[in-house]
Structures are given as C-alpha cells and as structure tokens.
C-alpha cells in the first residue's frame, strides 16, 4: 500500500470529504498536515478549526519532527498552498522533498486570477520559475482546482502534459427516487430560487434583484431565498424594499452548511453570479447535488468543469445581465418546466456519478499507483483527474468593468 501525505495551510470543510475517502482507502498511510494555524478571520466566518478529531490530521507547527518524517518519506506528496514564509525551516523542508526526484502532486487555483498581464513582470516570472517551472521535467504534477488554472501555468511553461482537472468536493448526499422526484419542479407550483454566497461585490448578489424584476414582470409565481451575510446586506435589504420585492425575496442571513443545503433542497433553481475572482465556487457542487437547475457565470473556476451549458445547467458569459436574462427566460418559457426538471436530474447525476470525493480519491489513488510503477498514465476521459485542457480565460479588460476586490 502506498503512503500519501497532503500538506496545505489548514484543513477546511471542503477538503474533509476527500481526505476522509483517502483515509478510508489508505488508513494511517494517509496524512493531512496543517502548515499554519487557521486565521481568526476564517473562524469569524464560521470555519471550524477543530481538526483534532480527524485521525489523519497533523500540525507542522506542533509536531515538526513527525511531520518532517512524513513529508520526506511518503511515496507521494500532495502539496497545496501552505502559507509558509519563504525560506523558513518548514518551507525548506518541502523544497528538499520537491528537489528529491520523488513524486509530488501539487494542487492550485489560478495564479493570475486578476489578469494574465501580470505574467510580464520579470520579478514575478523569476518567482514562478523557482516555484513551478524548474520542475517541468521532473515527477511533479499539477491538479487544477479551477478551469482556468491550466492556461495560467501553460503561459509560463510549467507542468507540460502533467495538468489534470481537480476541484473541491463538499459532502455528497444521495436521495432515493421518491426524494428526488419530490424535489423536481412541476408546472403550476411556485418556482423556488436560491442564491447562497457571502454578500460582497465579486459574488454579484444584485443579480437576485435583477432576476426578481424580470420574473415579476413576466408574472411568474416565484420566491428567492438569499442565504449569506456581508457588507452588501444592508444595501440589498434597502433595494429589495425600494423595489417592492419583500414578498418574493427573503434575505435569510448566515446559515450553517447543513441549513444552506436544506434551502437548496427546497429550491428548483440556483443562481451563481460570481466573477473571475472566484477560484472555484463550492456552492455550485452543493446546489447541483441538491438537484437545482443552476444558472451560473462561466467566469468562476468550477463552472466550465461542472456545467455543460444546455445539458445539465445554463451558463452566461462575462457576468452579462443580457445573457443572464436570456437564460433565465429560457427556464420560464412555455417548456421551461420540462427544461428545469431535466437540468435538475442531470445536475444531480453529474455530482453523484463523477464530481464527488469518493470518485476523486479513487482516481487519484489510481494515478498515484501508475506514477509509482513508472508506467504511462491513463487519464479518464472526463471528470476529476482527466486532462486539463486550456480554456480561454476572461480577457484582461474585464477587470476594468468590475468594482471589486478580494474582500
């Protein structure tokens, strides 16, 4: 049995299902090493730092010698973003493993999320060479946690033919046929819509108001639940009252992950409007698993991987309200009820058959065994661990159209 050690800054609720599956397969031969303590800001947002109950979690800042042994001697090292200071003892430990010629699988979101024009910086290129490009001929592989990651790394010549699709894998829920049938939209009932996100500019919560205005004008019987809190809450509340939408739009405030899923399960449609600054967007996984027909901005990292436009959901480009309106009206037209049900079923099937932690762990372990044996890698045709093709990213001028930042 191979041993796998996963090093990242700290474990979070999006990583635990995958790590649980790895531990289920490998037992004590799988370890997750937290490189740094969780920041207070994350805790304030409801992220739990209670990882002591997880048998595979170790803390580099508390068990340095034990963790160093795991990092040096494991068969395969998985390496996410660590948050370690450059040239610290811990950082040098990881670099020594990277330079050892033994397999390393890196996991990354975009490195040029705010624009690939940053790749022209000589200082930045030197740093990227040191961190990534110099390993392009070694047994170092890249798992792309977002559809635009591969293009960023190809731009700098890193990981040629060694980039694979990856993402985040929230808890998977399975429903029996009766439960799933009860979640599907039927003509004549109220259309239930959900939006769940931190209420900040890059998430574009104002699309909820835009959607409500469209549906009200079309005389559609609907209700939208907005789950989340943030700096735009008061502004949204005021605009909802001003537009006379209080009866059809509810601001739910913050809810636990379990409560968010309950809202999704009662919804037929999910709106996801995040722009290019959204590295992944795990609520898309959750909404699809909850059998929601998702209308999503194609700029967020998860969307091109999870949603096939017109097959298991709908996408709109560039956070365009015009494109969004067209897609929303498709769902409320004469055959909209049939389309919504079709997307609900297909979205659910996408998650339970492919984009889930169990399948991701199974495929990753198969990949690990292949690279450990020295044979050729046979990547699956689609889903996690399939080859990450280069997808055209949002153009650099998109940034000039957005009044936002990474809040």
Image (cartoon, grey):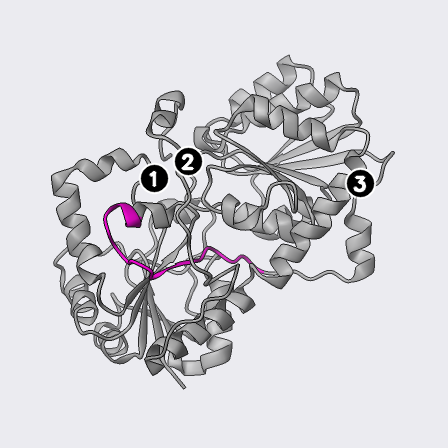
Secondary structure under badge 1? loop
Q: Quadrant of the C terminus?
A: top left
User: Would you say 168 lies left or right of 253 here?
Assistant: left
> In this figure, which residue is indicated by the disc labeled 3?
338
Q: Earlier in the sequence, mark 1 or mark 3?
A: 1
How far is disc 3 from disc 2 in space, using C-alphas?
31 Å
Name the spot of residue 103 as percent of width and height, x first: 28, 73
Q: First in sequence: mark 3 or mark 2?
A: 2
Q: Main secondary structure of the magenta part?
A: loop
Question: Foreground: 38 or 397?
Answer: 397
Q: Are marks 2 and 1 in contact (CB under 8 Å)?
A: yes
- Of 40 and 286, nearer the camera is 286
Secondary structure state at the residue bearing disc 2: loop
Q: Residue 290 in the image: x percent, y percent?
A: 67, 51
Residue carrying label 1? 113
Q: Specify the label residue 42 is tagged with.
A: none
Task: Name the front one of labels 3 and 2.
Answer: 3
Q: Quadrant of residue 93?
A: bottom left
Give the position of the N terminus as an image quadrant: bottom left
- Along the polypeptide, which appears first: circle 2 or circle 1? 1
Q: Is residue 343 above or below residue 368?
A: above
CA separation in Å, label 2 and label 1 = 7 Å
Task: Find the magenta span and give its range.
Answer: 153-171
Q: Gap between marks 1 and 3, in whole Å?
A: 37 Å
Q: Is residue 246 visible?
A: no
Q: Is residue 362 left or right of residue 208?
A: left
Disc 2: which residue = 276
For label 3, count other residues whose C-alpha is less than 10 Å away and answer few (under 14), some (14-19) or many (20+).
some
């Amino acid at each position: 049995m191979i041993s796998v050690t996963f090093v990242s800054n700290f474990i979070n609720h999006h990583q635990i299902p995958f790590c649980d599956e790895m531990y289920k397969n490998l037992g004590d031969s799988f370890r997750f090493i937290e490189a740094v303590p969780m920041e207070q800001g994350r805790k304030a947002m409801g992220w739990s730092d209670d990882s002591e109950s997880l048998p595979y979690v170790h803390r580099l800042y508390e068990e340095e010698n034990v963790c160093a042994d795991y990092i040096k001697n494991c068969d395969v090292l998985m390496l996410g973003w660590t948050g370690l200071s450059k040239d610290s003892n811990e950082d040098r430990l990881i670099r020594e493993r990277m330079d050892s010629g033994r397999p390393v699988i890196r996991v990354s979101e975009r490195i040029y999320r705010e624009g690939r024009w940053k790749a022209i910086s000589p200082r930045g290129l030197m740093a990227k060479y040191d961190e990534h490009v110099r390993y392009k001929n070694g047994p170092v592989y890249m798992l792309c946690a977002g559809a635009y990651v591969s293009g960023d790394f190809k731009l700098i010549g890193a990981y040629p033919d060694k980039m694979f699709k990856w993402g985040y894998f929230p808890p998977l829920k399975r429903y029996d046929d009766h439960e799933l049938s009860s979640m599907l939209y039927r003509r004549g009932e109220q259309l239930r819509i959900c939006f769940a996100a931190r209420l900040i500019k890059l998430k574009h919560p104002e699309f909820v108001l835009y959607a409500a205005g469209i549906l009200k004008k079309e005389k559609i019987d609907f209700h939208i639940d907005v789950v989340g809190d943030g700096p735009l809450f008061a502004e949204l509340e005021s605009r909802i009252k001003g537009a006379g939408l209080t009866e059809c739009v509810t601001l739910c405030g913050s809810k636990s992950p379990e409560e968010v899923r309950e809202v999704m399960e009662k919804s037929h449609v999910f709106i996801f409007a995040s722009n290019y600054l959204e590295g992944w967007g795990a609520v898309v996984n959750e909404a699809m698993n909850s059998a929601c027909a998702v209308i999503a901005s194609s700029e967020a990292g998860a969307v091109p991987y999870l949603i096939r436009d017109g097959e298991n959901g709908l996408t709109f480009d560039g956070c365009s309200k015009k494109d969004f309106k067209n897609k929303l009206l498709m769902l409320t037209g004469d055959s909209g009820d049939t389309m919504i049900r079709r997307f609900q079923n297909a979205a659910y099937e996408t998650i339970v058959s492919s984009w889930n932690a169990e399948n991701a762990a199974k495929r990753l372990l198969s990949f690990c065994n292949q690279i450990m044996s020295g044979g050729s890698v046979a990547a699956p045709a689609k889903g996690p661990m399939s080859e990450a093709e280069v997808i055209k990213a949002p153009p650099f001028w998109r940034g000039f159209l957005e009044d936002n930042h990474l809040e």
